[in-house]
Amino acid sequence: PKSVILQSKEKKKEVKNPPLLYNLADLQSFCSKAFHITPDNSLKIAQTLYEKKLTTYPRTDARVLSTAVAKDYERKFGYKIPSRYGNDRKITDHYAIIPTFDNEGKRNYDGLNDLEKKVYEAIKGRFMDIMKPPFIYDAVSVTYNGVTYTSACKSESATTINVSLTGKCKITIVTDTP
């Protein structure tokens, strides 16, 4: 083991909300990374999903819903959408891309190709994620030998941080228990 000089350590509670809903640019970026398709191809798939009544209008800049749509989804489907995701002031023409849960759309799902299904499931997954509680975690950082390392720990009682220095050695730093 290599010896180091511990200069500081800090632990603070962090809160991370689920991501905002997809607008067209975010959906295209996700599809490019996840499915290796072009933005144009993503738009074509999003348009197909819209035409088959599976999702809402895709050409949007908004990442939130109107308050009316949020209330409508709660009334129709029982989805309690947090107020963070319903904001009329952040909508220009159309609200974020979400599943419609329309009966005709459900019937059209089986006719989708595999890539269209993956994009639909991504849209649906992002929508379902907004109803999850925030992720609360401890952000732990230590500074030694002039370098700061940060780790996100889910556990309330995180006491150990493992740090690998360019793969040459492994250092375990044990912090005080809370």
Image: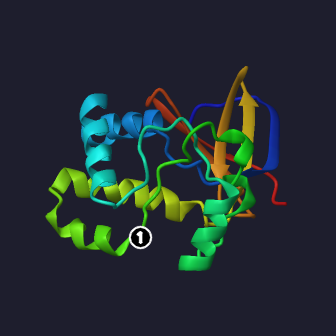
| Residue picked out by circle 1 | 101
When asked about the image quadrant of residue 148, the answer is top right
- In the picture as drawn, the residue positioned furthest to the top comes out as 146
Determine whether, in the image, residue 164 is placed left or right of residue 47: right
- Quadrant into which the C terminus falls: bottom right
Residue in the picture at 69% in, 58% down: 67
Residue in the picture at 23% in, 52% down: 116
Q: Is residue 169 above or below residue 153?
A: above
Q: Element type at marker 1?
A: loop
Q: Give amino acid for label 1.
A: Phe
Determine whether, in the image, residue 32 is placed left or right of residue 143: left
Q: Is residue 134 above or below residue 62?
A: below
Front residue of 102 and 17: 102
Tell me residue 135's x, y (percent). 66, 59
When asked about the image quadrant of residue 10, the answer is top right
Tell me residue 16's x, y (percent). 68, 51
Front residue of 31 and 44: 44
Front residue of 87 and 140: 87
Q: How is the image coloured?
A: rainbow
When asked about the image quadrant of residue 2, the answer is top right
